[in-house]
Amino acid sequence: MAEVQGCELPEDLYYDVEKDTWAKPLENNIVMLGMTDVAQTQAGKILHVTFKKIGSNVQKRGNTATIESGKWVGPIPSPVSGEIVEVNDALLKDPLLLNVSPYKDAWVSKVKASDMSELNSLLTGKEAVERYKEKIMKGQIQCMRCSSQ
Amino acid sequence: MQGKRHEVILLVSKWCEECIPADNAWKRLFDERKNFNYKSLDVAEPEGRRLSIELYIRSVPSTIIDGKLSFVGIPTKEEASELLDFS
């Protein structure tokens, strides 16, 4: 797992760096998506999540859910176009999961992608980490600080 | 009167070298006094992460005593002892 300024970045995921979302291709053109460590850090303590209905169609970067924190209300855009086939109900009971485990327990939705080639426009591996490094440094984003720095 | 046994948690991270001397300071004090509970939690792990979010912790190493942020950085053994006595 890559790490920049205390921000975790699993290298096996696909990232829409600009929108701070990640995508993980599963079987049968299903794509799991969620928000990144950078996004949860900037959102602050997340208090509430509402989902777009299962069965809805979403465009690439269309909204799949809305999150509310103490200081922010915002969308979680889909990295790919398609139909929402599943949402993570655990987040309704425990929205803090998004802060605690943004890449595992707090996946947000699953979309049946209408065009898997859209994943090619996302970044993954070293390239994603490098782009995020630029974004984190430029934005002076700090997910966790080492007290001596 | 027998005082309450304090719960001391040190929030750490693998990529932050300062966490090692901080952990050592608390372990040395524990070996000496044995009158408090001590554990370290990695903020990359769910339990450590949840605590860091709930207490709005943004730096490691951070010392939590009885659920409250008490110190950030590397305590000397004397500082750690004082933190316990005044908690």
Image (cartoon, coloured by chain):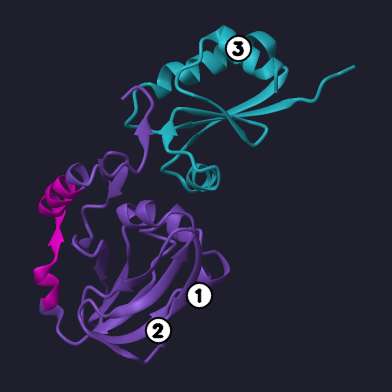
CB atoms of marks 1 and 3 within 8 Å: no
Chain A: what color? purple
Image: magenta residue range: A118-135
Q: Label 3 amino acid?
A: Leu
Marks 3/2: CA distance? Answer: 53 Å
Residue A130 highlighted magenta (yes or no) = yes
Residue that appears at 22% across and 57% down: A12
Question: Viewer-nearest of labels 1 and 2?
Answer: 2
Marks 1/3: CA distance? Answer: 44 Å
- Which x, y percent locates residue B43? 44, 40
Using the image, tell me which numbered label, if any, was put on residue A89. Answer: 1
- Which x, y percent locates residue A126? 12, 49
Chain B: what color? cyan
Q: Label 2 amino acid?
A: Lys
Classify the position of the C terminus of chain B by image quarter. Answer: top right
Residue count near mark 2 (Cα–Cα under 10 Å), binned few <14, some 14–19, many ≥20: some
Q: Label 1 amino acid?
A: Asp
Magenta-highlighted stretch: main secondary structure?
A: helix
- Quadrant in the rendering for residue A86: bottom left
Relative height, residue A129 to residue A97 (above, below) = above
Q: The residue tagged with tag 3: helix, strand or loop?
A: helix
Q: Please report, as a chain letter, where disc 1 is located.
A: A
Q: Are marks 1 and 3 on the same chain?
A: no
Residue B34 highlighted magenta (yes or no) = no
Residue that appears at 51% across and 58% down: A96
Disc 2: which residue: A52
Classify the position of the N terminus of chain B by image quarter. Answer: top right
